[in-house]
Amino acid sequence: MDKSAKKRILLKIGSNTLTKETNTISREKLADIAVQISKLKDQYDFVIVSSGAIAAAKEFVKLQVKDSNIQVKQALASIGQPYLMRLFQDAFAKENLLTAQCLLSYADFENKDTQANISNTISVLLENNYIPIINENDTVSTEEIKFGDNDKLAALTASLLKVNLCVIATNTNGIYTKASMKLGVPKTILEVTNIEVLKSEVSDEKSSHGTGGMASKLIAAEILQKDEIEMHIVNGLGNNFLIDSLNNKVNYTTIK
């Protein structure tokens, strides 16, 4: 198939998805993602924005300072990032998928020349069948450590690359109505175009392992909406979540 005919998907994988809400990176989840991408690779080119470097480091490192200290989190991220990449490489290699690491910071999106360099590099990787795996350069940047779990980074990258779809994999079936949450029976908001309406439904609580929550996903949605890029918020905990959402077999939130 002509690569120019393929659609481009940016898949953002949150920490809760990667760990399957445990304290360690799930090899089973990485394998699940690799299998799905292998099945979809003839239709789509994939760019991945992945959290999880800090979670990866915590598997085998205990630093003698409170984890809430931002410098400690930066150190954990620098330790965990190469380990996380090795886990991706191992899982994806079993499906004959090639991966490449890209570390970005917000300053990279503020300069036209740097933006062009990012876009050109990722285009070359995709043309040569490498899947770029992007994370924030936590050693020099702290914004996503403090708030966002890479949601904003995913949106900025998706907009820069002019992807066809941005999929945010998290630990819920999209955004739930506030009323249904109060009743204890979550009901997914399936589709919305007015983000202001969604804001009244979203709390600012953050997830157990990630730093985002739904508030940061709405910030990402606003960035994407300006460039007319559709965003799906899907539950990444189950197997086959990406294929099932693309085929509308599960509930998720679409923001257009």
Image (cartoon, helix red, strand yellow):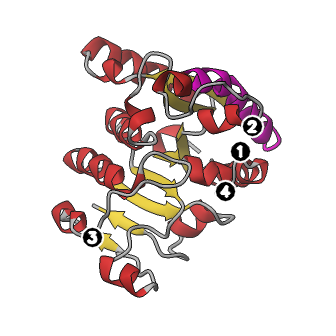
Residue 20, image x, y percentages: 66, 56
Dot 1 or dot 4: first in sequence order is 4
Q: Residue at x 63, y 26 (%)?
A: 81
Q: Amino acid at mark 2?
A: Glu
On screen, residue 189 versus residue 10, left or right, reads: left
Q: Which mark is residue 201?
A: 3
On screen, residue 28 versus residue 42, left or right, reads: right
Q: Residue at x 50, y 17 (%)?
A: 139
Cα distance in 3D space between marks 1 and 4: 8 Å
Q: Which mark is residue 20?
A: 4
Q: Amino acid at mark 1?
A: Ile
Dot 3 or dot 4: first in sequence order is 4
The quadrant of the picture occupied by the N terminus is top right
Q: Kindly check if marks 2 and 1 are in contact, taking CB atoms under 8 A apart as contact.
A: yes
Mark in front: 2 vs 1: 2
**Which residue position holds label 1?**
25
**Which residue position holds label 2?**
59
Q: Toward the viewer: 71 or 243?
A: 71
Q: Is residue 67 above or below residue 26?
A: above
* First to last magenta residue range: 75-96
